[in-house]
Image (spheres, helix red, strand yellow):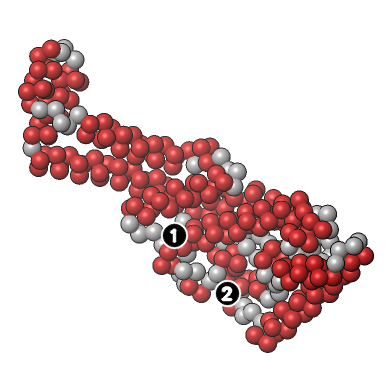
Amino acid sequence: MDTTARATSDDDKDIQLTDWIDTLEQLGIDTKKTLEEEHALIEKQHTINAHWARFRSGQGRSLIDAATKLSEEPADYDSFANAIITASIAADPSAEERTRKVVGLAAQFAGQAAYNHFRKRGEGVYKLITPVFTETRDAIIRDGAALPEGVNDLDTAARAGVEQEWLRLEALIDRWSTLLQLIESWYVNRVLPTDGHNLERLNVWMFVYENYEEAANTYGSGILGTIRQVINGDATLLTIDQVDELGSNKVRSSDPNEKRASHHRQQQADDEANAILRAEWEANGISPRLAAASAKRRR
C-alpha cells in the first residue's frame, strides 16, 4: 500500500473524512445514523465558520456607526456587546488577527475531533460496510456465473440478449472497486489498526480475498477478471491480523511465463467465442466484414 497517501495536515484530514462519508453515502449507507457523533462535530465546525462569516460581515461598521446604533437601541445587551466588540476589532488590525486565530483554532479543533472520533472506531468501521460488501460479492458471483459463454463486453452482451445484465455487472464491479479503495484508505490512514505491520508489503486484495494466492493468479482483467477473482478468491472481509495468520503477505503470484501462458489461454478462449459469434451473425445475415470489424473493436 502507498502510505504516502496518508492525510497529515488538518485540511487533508477534513477532506479525507468528508470523502469517507461521501463514499459511504454513495454505497447506500445512512451515515446520519451510523456516524451520528461525527456529523454532530462537523456541524459544530460549520456553525463556527458561519458565525465567523456573519461577524466579518459587520466589521466595516465605524466607531461612529456603532455608537449611533447603541444610542438608538441600548436595551439589548447582546446587540450592545456585539456592536462594541465588532467596532473595536475593526479599529484594531492586531485584535482582528487575534480574533481570526481564535476562530480558526476553534474550527480546527472541531474538525480534529470529528476525524479522531472516526479513527477511534477502528475495526468497527468494517461493520459499516459488511452488509454492502456481502451483497455486492454475492451479486457478482451470481450474475457473473450466469453470463453466457462468449460475452466479454457490452457489444457481445447486447447481441446475446444480456445487455442489462452486463450493465448491472459493470455497476457491481464499480461498487466493488469503491469498497476496496475505502478499505485501503482506512488502513493507510490508520483507522484500522496497523501496529507492528509494514503496510508497504501489503496490498488491498489481501484484505478481501481469503484465498489470496488464487485471486492473485487468476487470469484476465477488467470485469471478467474481477468476477473470476471474487469467485476463486473466496472474497470476505479480513483484518490485518487475519492476513498474517493466512500468510497472504508471503504469497507470490505465478511467474511471468505462467502468467503469459494463462493470458494466452484466455485469449484463445475469447477468440474461439468470437469465432462462434461471427458464425452466428453470418447465419443471421450479418456480413463477415461487419462481424470481423466488431470483433476487432472488442479486442
Of 272 and 8, which appears nearest the observer? 272
Look at the numbered disc 1 and give the secondary structure of its residue.
loop
Residue on which disc 1 sits: 189
Q: Amino acid at mark 2?
A: Asn
Look at the numbered disc 2 and give the secondary structure of its residue.
helix
14 lies left or right of 250 = left
User: Callout 1: 10 Å neighbours few (<14), some, many (20+)?
Assistant: some
Q: Amino acid at mark 1?
A: Asn
Residue 197 appears anywhere in the view:
no
Name the spot of residue 99 as percent of width and height, x first: 17, 39
Tell which tag, 2 or 1, sits nearer the viewer: 1
Name the spot of residue 122 as percent of width and height, x first: 49, 54
283 lies left or right of 65 = right
Name the spot of residue 206 as percent of width and height, x first: 60, 68
Q: Is residue 116 above or below residue 276?
A: above
Residue on which disc 2 sits: 249
User: Callout 2: 10 Å neighbours few (<14), some, many (20+)?
Assistant: some
- Residue that appears at 53% across and 49% down: 23
Quadrant of the snapshot with the C terminus? bottom right
Of 198 and 88, which appears nearest the observer? 88
Q: Quadrant of residue 240?
A: bottom right
- Residue that appears at 52% across and 62% down: 184
- Residue that appears at 20% across and 20% down: 78
